[in-house]
Amino acid sequence: MRELIRKLVETYGPSGAEEKIRAAIRAEVTSLADEVRVDPLGSLIVRKQGSGEGKRIAVAAHMDEIGIMVTYVDEKGFARFTRIGGVLPLTCVGARVLFASGVTGVISVENKRDDPGKVPRFEQLYIDVGASSRDDCPVRVGDAAVFIQPFAVQGTRLIAKAMDDRIGCAVLIETLRRLKHTPHDVHFVFSVQEEVGLRGAYTSAYGIEPDMALAVDVTRTGDTPECYPMAVELGKGPAIKVQDTGMISHPVVRELLVQRAEAGHIPYQLEVLEGGSTDAAAMQLTRAGVPAGCISIPCRYVHSPSEMVDERDVENGVRLLLEVLQAN
Amino acid sequence: MMLKELSEATGVSGDEENVRSILLRAIREHVDEVRVDALGNILALKRGTTQNGLRVMLAAHMDEVGLMVVGHDGDGFLRVRTVGGVDPRLLPGAALEVGPDHLPGVIGIKPIHLLKSGEEQQVPSIEDLVVDIGATSKDEATKLAPPGTYITFATRFREGSITVSGKAFDDRAGCAVLVEIVRGERFPFDLHAAFTVQEEVGLRGARVAAYAIAPNCAFVLEGTVADDLPKDKDSSPTTRLGHGPAITLMDNTFIAHRGLVRLLTDTAEALGIPYQFKQPGIGGTDAGAIHTSREGVPSATVAVPCRYIHSPVSLLNLDDFNNTITLMREALARLTSSTLRSDL
Amino acid sequence: METISLLKQLTEAVGIAGREAPVRALITQLWQPLVDEIREDKLGSLIAFKRGADTSAPKLMLAAHMDEIGLVVTGIEEGFIRIARVGGTDRRVLPGLEVTVHGREELPGIVASRPPHVLSEEERKSPVPWDKLFVDVGLPAAQVEALVSVGDFISVRRETVELKNRRVAGKAMDDRAGVAAITLALEHLSYMRHSWDVFAVATAQEETGLKGAITTAYGIAPDLAVALDVTFGKHPGVSEPGVWPLGEGPTIGIGPNFHPRLAARLREVAEAHEIPYKLDPLPGASGTDAWAIQVSREGVPTALIGIPLRYMHQPVEMLAAQDVERAGRLLASFIAGLEADFLKKLAWDTPTDESERRQ
């Protein structure tokens, strides 16, 4: 799976401009699916029709990653920007970004600030793309960029930008690869625009009308120095979500995930996440409501350019999803 | 002049009646069907010249920001709260119209002569401000302006040669643009014009209008922020007066569909219509509610740049206004279903 | 059923947002004899249907939320339980509170508070932050680990009490008071004739985002809706306007969230039946199920009846039983008086003859 993950995380795809990552994912799944379509907002929906005795299940992982968008190019060719999704100013200073055209930029911060001790505000940051004036600047208002960091492996830890949620996409693709038999009509949704408001999953679920919805996304951990307490750790298995800021998992779905994990002897953790949500929260509220849950891959440093997961959790995440889809 | 009539009409979110009747009169003879829905949106259909099956929604919101009476004090003053995003710092010294009878009212604060040191720095909050209609008792005030009474700025429209000023250009400018489009020639596709309610309090009308229409794509017509005043730092003006209609790429409520944006810019360039991109990440429009309707609706927002929106008096450039109408008409004429492809 | 014992039953039942099963069972029991059909929706809201006399009757939805705020277990440390809130739980009232941890067993617990003797001046000046709050169930660590898991819910353990002047205080008056008002209305309606079909809904997960209202409104697709929720009661520490005295009747919401002619009809009914009420002007979101229902599908004319409540989101939420009764009577009289073609009266404008008019 490492090669698949590497390919996915290194592909450009900020919210609203997911073409490249959609094409990359499409290439991986077309031969494995019964039906592939793209819905009006751009989510990729890959259907695996089961034997028909089961339910209609939507499983979503979002293709989009956080990024930045140029808001203004000044006289000297420096670009000001706004965030796409939950980018933190703290992770911006000194970061490198990559535009769709291949232009690379460096983010820095105004030297003269009235409060240099505090975390800078977005208005105090700028991108240097090596231009000398507005006229020769290779980027324009509206151009979107993503953070650059190469994929790295350290023992069982995998480090890259956009693990959120390319790791979820990898889990879905790998599950689709290994899924031999299922009684269910499974719709794998590679959703767009999750980072800016769970928009793709909400509309995709409306179209699919599933009986049950699952998201596969990252969650935070409580295992780094002086962090806020949280009962999830890297390497202890995928997390089964109890609740997060946007959703309380349907107890029946949660129970199902726990049962399948135990039946398959798959290690798992129970997760309560404060400060974040997933596509499941959106799918839960479509039409007259959908019982929803989430399989989370524990991830350190979420929304930084160096997100870290443990590949054992990823493998176990695939096994858990397979257990769920293969059972009645 | 339609913009003048619309600007001077009162229509705070939830109370759009006056604006609605002007618009119904203005479009009635130019559409094939019109109705008012449960929330008060005007939904009008102008059938296409072909049966190409495309359903295109155009939306502009009828409501403006304002105030609401929430209580009365013993001396006959009205206690108020803002409806939509009104900056309370703009209220001291304002001239207002209160209620359906347009009773004159004012907001005044402690005179400068009487301020203690440091007080001039303080910003009064909406809880501290009162509206004075000249009543002398709580009873009188309650009778004249009962709880729930809406209040608008009492601003007269003024026409100059290049710019015009008035209240509520957000979004009476958009409504005026939409009226012109509805009054014009038919398009190949069915045009669903929606004059929406309650945008300022949460994009409410647009949401149900989009559900009812179930369009294939949508354009929102707005009056948007122009912050092209002198600044200390070389930074974005958001939009600039005189530089053409402003196209949204991304704001706090949605990301515009690339195909629709390209349609607009290609059209503008082909015809020499000036245009600009609105600074990404500022504000929100009805597109936020429309694009997530049902299975998703590719959407775009085009706006007339307006200085001082959400204040007692805004300013816009007439060329920008007219160019917005032209750009929309011409772009719509070139719209086909391949513009909407999401899998490119 | 007698109002105060009804309130006591409803408020003492447990039903944290997302885990409403116990209170849902109670409400099912209370409503079953009063309605024709009763079912649960996918997110756990309870929908009760009472048929109207008219065969092609339009649909009225009533909504009061059955969920209450609470806490959830986020971890266990040396036998002490770490917590986070479910809904808008106020941490200022937590230290010293008696709770129930719903683990493998129902365990009584106390929200731990360190005695003033050991705290610094600084620490005593502000409320305890969330990461320093623990629940103590008084058991050895190993037992706690065996009986309690991350994700278990914790509810407030508090008996509802009657005070002077038929005032009642307890936890979860928000919004079991609304559920009580609907119950009373259904009781009245059992001997009143009504044309409209009535869907009485005890919504789930209001406190965590109006979720039950969103999905039930979509599923029912009502023509009209009335929500019943609590509103801010007047007491020292809260300033006017926007707060209401106890015992002077329910409030009727006015503002963008509410159809003005529906609010006007409620006022007429109140006046005709000599039910005291106050107008509650709300310039934006009402913070209630009404906000979600109004924008369901093609839009729903909506109203809000408010029951004044002191000390909202604290275990001592207090209201006047008379206000709950008045809300119930107002609702029942309104329903009984709803003519079959009432929707015509809500039409905003009359388009011309040539254009279409949809109900």
Image (tube, coloured by chain):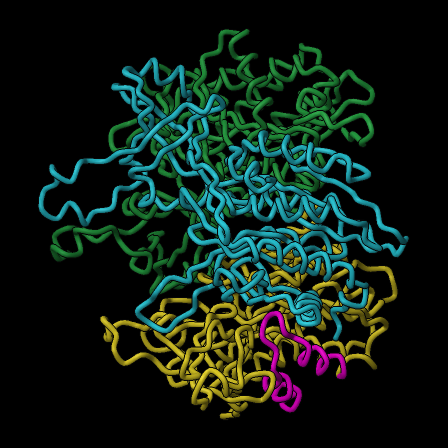
Question: On screen, C251 above or below B255?
Answer: above
The magenta stretch is: A1-27
Q: Main secondary structure of the magenta part?
A: helix
Along the line of sight, the residue nearer the viewer: B317 or B103: B317
Query: Residue B118: percent from the left, percent from the top?
Result: 12, 48
Say whether residue A263 is visible. Answer: no
Query: Residue C161: percent from the left, percent from the top?
Result: 36, 25
Q: Residue furthest left?
A: B117
Residue at 39% over, 28% down: B70
Query: Residue A75: percent from the left, percent from the top?
Result: 41, 80
Query: Residue A239: percent from the left, percent from the top?
Result: 55, 69
Along the line of sight, the residue nearer the viewer: C353 or C34: C353
Q: Which one of the lettered chains is coloured green?
A: C
Along the line of sight, the residue nearer the viewer: C275 or C347: C347
Q: Is residue B106 left or right of residue B14?
A: left
Color used for chain A?
yellow
